[in-house]
Each structure stands twice: as C-alpha cells, then as structure tokens.
Image (spheres, helix red, strand yellow):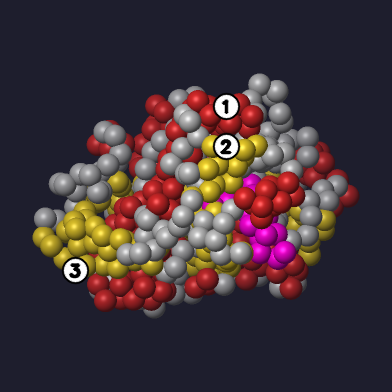
C-alpha cells in the first residue's frame, strides 16, 4: 500500500474534491505543504474556497485531468472504476488511495486522535466535542461532516497533538482509521446496499473497537443492544454512557426542555451527581450525544465550567435542526435526517417547538434505503401533522423501478395521515404558500437537496 511521506510533501489529485470530507483534507494537506489539485462535477461554495487558497480545481471529470505530474490520486467510495479519471490514473500506474485510507494515514500524525462513530449523530457530536476542545484552548485539528460556525467551515487546522474527526461505517471506511480514542454513539441498520444485515454492521463496530490500542479509550453508548458484545475483545479502557442504562458511567437525570426544545439535565458520573448542564440544541437525542462528550471531556480533564461555556456557545451545525427563517409567519427549519430513527428524533424535538401544524417535506435518500425501511419511514413520519413527499434522491444509485415516493405516500395514507406527493420543487413551493398559515412549523428533511425548497421560499 502506498504510504504518504509527510516529511516530503508530494503532488496529490482529489477526484471529487468538492465533497465535505474530501475538501477538508485537501485543505489540510495543502497547509502541510502538499501540492493539491482536484476535480468535481460543478462549482460550489466549497470549491471556490479551495481555489481561494491556491488549490487548482477543474470542473467536470475527464481523463485529461490526470497527468504524470501527479504522485497520488485520492478518490471516494462513490467513485466507480469506470470514472474517466480513476480509469486513466489506473492505466498510468499512478498510486491510488481511497479517502478513508488517506484519513487514516493523516491520523497517525496525532498522538491524540479522536474518532466519533455511530449510525446517527456523528456530525453533531463531533461538533460538540470540537467546541469543548476549542473552549479548553487545546488547539485541535478538526474534520467535521458539516459546517461548524466555531471554525467557519468543515475543517480546522490546529497545531497540537489533538485530532477530532467523524468515523463513518459505510463501506467500512472507519476500519481504515487509527484512533487513540473512539466513540460509538449507536448501532442500527443502515447502508443496506453495503451491509448484509444488522449482525454484519455490529461486526464492523466490533472491529472498530478492536482497533483502539491498549493505551487508548473507547466511549460507548450502553443503550446499544448487548453493547458488551461490541467491546468484549477490545484491549482498551471502556467508558459507558446512556440515558436508559442506569449503571452507565455517565448518565442523566431530571431532563427538562425549554420552550424551544433545548434540553437541560443533571449529569450522574460514576454514580455521583454532578452539575446541571444546559444545551442550545434540541431533543433527547442531543442529551445523549452530549453525555458522550462529557465522558470525553472528563477523559481529558476539561473542567465543568469550560464544558458549559462550550455548550452555551454551540447552537448546532448546518442542516441539523437548523433555523432557516420565517415566511408569512411560517417557521422554516432544515434537517439532514434520512433514516427512520433520525426522523423520529427530529420530530420528537419539533413537537416541543412552538407551532400550530407541524409540516414535513421529506425527500427520501437512495432507493435501497427507501425500500429497506418503507414502513419504518411511514411510521416515523406519522409524528408530523401533514407530510409532503418529493421524489427519491438517487445519490449514487440508479432507479431500480420497484420503489418510489408514491409507495411511501400510500403507506402514510394507511396510517391515516394527510400526505401530498409532488415531483417538482416549484409545485411544492406554490402549495406551501397557498396552504400553510401563520404559526405553522415547516421542516425540510433529507440528505439530498430538499433544503433548496425552504431557501427558495425565503427568497420569494
């Protein structure tokens, strides 16, 4: 396997440089003295930022973009071998590396490498942890899968031994990482286009736990079914947290919510009552996410006052229950939820938010996920008063012809829900302006481009 020599920076080309993770690491390696180029399908705010740093970005992927001046080509799991740049680099014998492998090699440069994993909540939890480390003046390097206001983007280049990143299980990417501290937030069925079943997913998380060295630490949610099985072969220290597991090392009592759904709770650490913490993010799921960060803060001996200052400053990340604005008295929120569990958590928080009717515009993400969780999607979405569906966002997939948003609409109708389906975003915008009233709460939801609907409404 090709090994990046960080003492002698080389020339690296990124296929798909505009991706949220790829762009961050392109910027990080650029700061280390590497000569970075990249390609992407279209111009974006992210690619323009990279160009402002002096990174050359070309639009459209073409074999002509690959030259013998390149020492390494980095690509994502979404890049198919038929991609013209991938194919050309392979033909030319240029060393190639998948993104996760590159991230793993970067992590080896940090003696304190924190990887936050789980089916849900990675971006928010990574952001909370980052905010705490920043508040504690630990000067971390940060890679987050969203836009974090505290760092003005998705990457922060620090100058300490600390590195904080998300660790995604899809295609077993996180098994390429080398964390000294790992966090497992939850384990559920997802990415069924890659994993065979829940046992296959659990096995991957077991492997992740095993990767943490004996001198390291794993922080795991004790509310995970049979979490002991996940950690049974881990050689590192294990710290538990949870909301439903009273014997966990870190848990919460007396959870309350303010008028906007922001949580407050008393922390219980190793059976002893600690201070009360107040959050500026919504929902029970974020109380759980915060507990994992309290365990992390205790591991690094960060004091409670510093932690609370960080929690006060943290108002969430882009596309995670993000307040977008108001239109005709309608409050518009955007959320990245694209799995039934995430939808349930988001709508549970939304119910606590001031509103008349709760409307959701849901854009299913990928055909395989929609088909695998069709009835679960209907059940979770039924917590909304009224639902609008868009077409399925294909992402990396092709339409198999056996699943559609119309089928999801039928499942919702069986549950007695008021549901509407439109294939055109403009039609949805017209419908909203005609049918929603002052005081309604509208959530645009999904991992695709459904956010565009709310933003377009606010611009009209």
Asked if residue 127 is positioned above or below residue 71 in the image, the reply reads below
Task: State how far apart marks 2 and 1 are (Cα).
Answer: 9 Å
Foreground disc of the pair 3, 1: 1
Q: Quadrant of residue 227?
A: top left
For the point 52% across and 31% down, which residue is it? Answer: 412
Image: 142 above or below 63: below
**Boundaries of the magenta span:** 443-460
- The quarter of the picture where residue 34 lies is bottom right
Where is residue 91? Give x, y as percent.
81, 39
Residue 371 highlighted magenta (yes or no): no
Q: Which residue is mark 3?
A: 275
In this figure, which residue is indicated by the disc labeled 1? 410
Count neighbours of disc 1 (C-alpha within 10 A) and say few if under 14, some if 14 to 19, many if 20 or more. some
Q: Is residue 452 magenta?
A: yes
Q: Position of residue 204 (x, y in %)?
A: 43, 35
| 108 displayed left or right of 362 | left
Q: Contact, CB < 8 Å: mark 2 with mark 3?
A: no
Residue under the point 76% across and 53% down: 40
- Which numbered disc covers residue 419? 2
Q: Nearer the viewer, residue 160 or 146?
A: 146
Position of 160 with respect to 372 (left or right) is left
């Amino acid at each position: 396997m090709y090994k990046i020599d960080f003492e002698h920076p080389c020339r690296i080309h990124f296929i798909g440089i505009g991706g949220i993770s790829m762009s961050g690491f392109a910027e990080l390696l650029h700061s280390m003295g590497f000569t970075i180029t990249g390609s992407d399908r279209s111009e974006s705010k992210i690619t323009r930022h990279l160009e402002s740093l002096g990174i050359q970005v070309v639009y459209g992927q073409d074999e002509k973009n690959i030259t013998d001046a390149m020492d390494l080509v980095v690509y994502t799991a979404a890049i198919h071998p038929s991609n013209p740049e991938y194919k050309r680099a392979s033909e030319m014998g240029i060393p190639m590396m998948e993104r996760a492998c590159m991230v793993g090699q970067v992590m080896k440069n940090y003696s304190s490498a924190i990887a936050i994993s789980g089916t849900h909540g990675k971006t928010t939890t990574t952001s909370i942890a980052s905010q705490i480390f920043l508040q504690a003046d630990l000067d971390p390097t940060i890679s987050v899968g969203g836009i974090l206001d505290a760092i003005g983007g998705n990457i922060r280049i620090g100058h300490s031994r600390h590195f904080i990143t998300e660790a995604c299980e899809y295609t077993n990417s996180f098994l390429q990482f080398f964390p000294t501290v790992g966090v497992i937030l939850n384990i559920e069925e997802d990415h069924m286009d890659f994993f065979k079943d829940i046992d296959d997913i659990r096995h991957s998380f077991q492997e992740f736990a095993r990767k943490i060295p004996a001198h390291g630490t794993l922080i795991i949610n004790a509310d995970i079914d049979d979490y002991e099985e996940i950690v049974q072969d881990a050689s590192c220290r294990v710290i538990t947290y949870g909301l439903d597991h009273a014997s966990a090392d870190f848990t919460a009592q007396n959870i309350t919510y303010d008028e906007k759904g922001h949580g407050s709770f008393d922390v219980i650490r190793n059976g002893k009552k600690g201070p009360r913490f107040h959050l500026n993010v919504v929902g029970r799921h974020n109380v759980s996410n915060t507990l994992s960060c309290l365990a992390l803060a205790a591991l690094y001996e960060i004091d409670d006052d510093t932690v609370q200052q960080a929690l006060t400053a943290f108002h969430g990340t882009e596309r995670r229950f993000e307040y977008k604005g108001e239109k005709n008295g309608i409050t518009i929120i955007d959320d990245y939820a694209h799995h039934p569990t995430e939808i349930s958590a988001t709508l549970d928080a939304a119910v606590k938010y001031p509103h008349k009717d709760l409307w959701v515009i849901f854009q299913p993400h990928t055909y395989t996920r929609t088909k695998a969780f069709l009835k679960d999607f209907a059940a979770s979405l039924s917590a909304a008063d009224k639902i609008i569906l868009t077409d399925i966002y294909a992402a990396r997939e092709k339409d198999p012809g056996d699943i559609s948003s119309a089928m999801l609409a039928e499942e919702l109708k069986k549950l007695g829900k008021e549901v509407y389906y439109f294939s055109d975003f403009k039609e949805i915008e017209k419908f909203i302006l005609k049918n929603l009233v002052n005081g309604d709460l509208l959530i645009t939801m999904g991992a695709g481009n459904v956010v565009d609907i709310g933003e377009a409404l606010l611009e009209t």
